[in-house]
Image: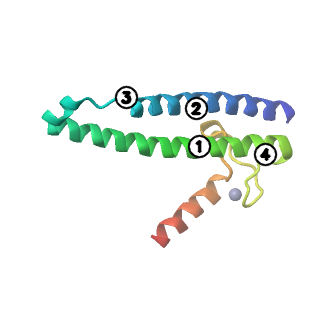
Amino acid sequence: MVDRVKELEALLQKEQKRIKNLLESLEAEGLEPQGPDHSDHPAEWASGLSQREYNEGEKVSLRHILAEIAHAMDKIQRHPEKVFKCEKCGKDIEDARVKAKPWARYCLTCRSRYEKSFLKRK
Ligand SMILES: [Zn+2]
């Protein structure tokens, strides 16, 4: 049990590092100077804009994952016994799910229920 938590913590730290690096490289891209020659090529300019929009979207989701990882690491510190339990129903989170998404808070059942109710509200 303790080993499993330690393993997860190492995994989370690794992911946190990887995502921070990704985020930093995205931010560095956004800081690249846009040369004046871009104005001569409206098509290129336009594609540059959509790339930037894409990067913004990526940054938002990466920051979201970082927040989820921080939450999971906080949980490891405070409630290591609850790390692999769903925050909604309290059942064990599926192994495959933990492997795919080590910071998952909910089991698959609760997650899909949540997604369904979210879709209905739209
Ligand atoms: Zn659940």
Foreground: 13 or 102? 13
> Which residue is denoted by mark 1 in the rendering?
65
Amino acid on which the number 3 mark rests in the picture: Glu
Give the farthest residue toward the left: 40
Q: Residues within 10 Å of mark 1 (few under 14, many from 20)?
A: some
Tell me whether the residue at label 1 lies in contact with that at label 3, contact meaning CB atoms closer than 8 angstroms: no
Residue 40 in the image: state x and y as whole percent. Answer: 13, 34
Foreground: 25 or 14? 25
Which residue is depicted at the point 79% across and 45% down? 75
> Which residue is denoted by mark 4 in the rendering?
75
Question: Could you tell me if residue 76 is visible in this image?
Answer: yes
Task: Kindly report the distance in space between the C-alpha atoms of the residues bearing marks 2 and 1.
Answer: 10 Å
> Which residue is denoted by mark 3 in the rendering?
32
Which residue is depicted at the point 48% across and 71% down? 120
Tell me whether the residue at label 2 lies in contact with that at label 4, contact meaning CB atoms closer than 8 angstroms: no
Amino acid on which the number 4 mark rests in the picture: Lys
Task: Kindly report the distance in space between the C-alpha atoms of the residues bearing marks 1 and 3.
Answer: 25 Å
Q: Quadrant of ligand 1?
A: bottom right
Foreground: 83 or 46? 46
Residue 31 in the image: state x and y as whole percent. Answer: 41, 32
Under circle 4, the secondary element is helix
> Which residue is denoted by mark 2 in the rendering?
20
Residue at mark 2: C-beta within 8 A of ligand 1: no
Going from the N terminus, do you reach mark 4 or mark 1 first? 1
Amino acid on which the number 2 mark rests in the picture: Lys
Which residue is depicted at the point 76% across and 54% down? 91
The answer to whether residue 112 is above or below residue 101 is: below
Under circle 1, the secondary element is helix
Task: Kindly report the distance in space between the C-alpha atoms of the residues bearing marks 2 and 3.
Answer: 19 Å
Under circle 3, the secondary element is loop
